[in-house]
Image: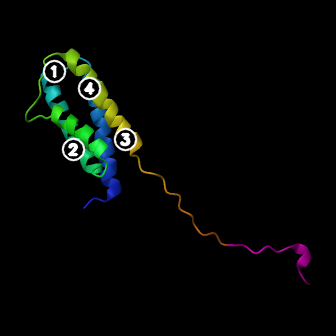
Amino acid sequence: MLDKKTTHNISRIISVCCALLLLIALFHAPREYYWLLRTVVSIGALLVIIQNVTNPYWVVLFAIVLILFNPIFPIYLYKKLLWMPIDIIVGTLFLIEIIINRPKKVKVLTPTKKETKTYERDRTI
């Protein structure tokens, strides 16, 4: 089984891939690319939902993304001009989620060995 840190890193990598694919979708691409886009964004949205189960805000936002980019029952808007703002907003959502939910760095304090100070003048000969 994967530990929490590994699954979080995988989720972050997939979220970055989703954001990049959504950015590329703003340009002209073949039809197969949009099927790939729907699949990867749906998987990414599902991972974000699983990762943030305790935060209802992210769950609702990415549930909408999951429904909108669903490859099984696709929603067709038929005009690229309608999809472009959606792609920008969803790509930005993936990046914001990565930034906000990045793991906090924990400062580990290591015990230091206390050195006793010796002064040259205190030595007895």
**Rendering coords of residue 95 (x, y %):** 36, 35
The residue where tag 2 is placed is: 46
In percent of the image, x 24 and y 50: which residue is there? 50
The residue where tag 3 is placed is: 98
**Rendering coords of residue 121 (x, y %):** 92, 75
* Of callouts 4 and 2, the N-terminal one: 2
How crowded is the residue under tag 3: few (<14 C-alpha within 10 Å), some, or many (20+)? some
* Of callouts 2 and 3, the N-terminal one: 2
* Of callouts 2 and 1, the N-terminal one: 1
Type of amino acid under label 4: Asp
Q: Which numbered mark, 2 or 1, is in the foreground of this view?
A: 2
Query: For the residue labelled by badge 1, is the local secondary structure a helix, a strand or a loop?
Result: loop
Type of amino acid under label 3: Ile
In percent of the image, x 26 and y 44: which residue is there? 59
The residue where tag 1 is placed is: 30
Are discs 2 and 1 less than 8 Å apart at CB?
A: no
The residue where tag 4 is placed is: 87
Q: Compared with residue 77, is residue 9 higher up or lower down, i.e. above or below? A: below
Query: For the residue labelled by badge 3, is the local secondary structure a helix, a strand or a loop?
Result: helix
Type of amino acid under label 1: Pro
Q: Nearer the viewer, residue 90 or 122?
A: 90
Q: Nearer the viewer, residue 91 or 112?
A: 91
